[in-house]
Image (tube, rainbow, N blue to C red):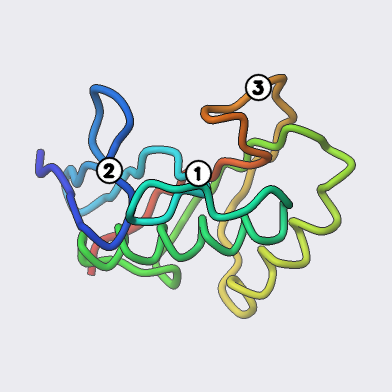
Amino acid sequence: MKKIHTTNAPEAIGPYSQGIVVNNIFYSSGQIALTPEGTLAGEDVQTQTHQIFSNLKAVLEEAGASLDTVVKTTVFLKDMDEFPTVNEIYGSYFENHQPARSCVEVSKLPKDVRIEIEVIALVK
């Protein structure tokens, strides 16, 4: 197992890593809308979703992967009524390549954010 760490994404806020590579597969921890400096990127789901994708791209790159090699995503939403907005933004990052996805509504997320996303990707 190889622990992934980059300063281009927020530090883990608990006893976990930003991601792990095992047998050429990258497993990310859930990314929330914290900037690399650790501040919340905004209150609205649009701003938070874009920040999450910025974080995901950073940890994927550090792992030797990219959004193009993502095979599965899991999206956690605080409010499923925001799904259409998130889906549109999500689609802008996965225009041609469309990994498998799950999306669930949850009652609460860390730092009281609106959304969290985790990915599984192949390492190049």
**Placement of the C terminus among the 4 image quadrants:** bottom left
CA separation, marks 3 and 1?
12 Å
- Look at 44% across and 72% down and name the residue there: 68
Counting residues from the N terminus, which is met first, the one under dot 3 or under dot 1?
1
Tell me residue 59's x, y (percent). 30, 58
- Looking at marks 2 and 3 on the same chain, the residue that comes earlier in the sequence is marked by 2
Please tell me the numbered disc located at residue 108.
3
Question: Are dots 1 and 2 in contact, CB under 8 Å?
Answer: no
Residue nearest the observer in this picture, 59 or 103: 59
Q: Residues within 10 Å of mark 2 (few under 14, many from 20)?
A: some
Q: Which residue is mark 1?
A: 32
The x, y position of residue 87, in whole percent, is 76, 59
Q: CA distance from mark 1 to mark 2?
A: 11 Å
Q: Is residue 28 left or right of residue 45?
A: left
- Secondary-structure class at tag 1: loop
The quadrant where residue 74 appears: top right
82 left or right of 30? right
Task: Specify the quadrant of the image occupied by residue 105.
Answer: top right
Query: Which image quarter is the N terminus in?
Result: top left
Which residue is drawn at the image coordinates 46% and 56% (left, top)?
Answer: 71
The residue carrying mark 2 is 11
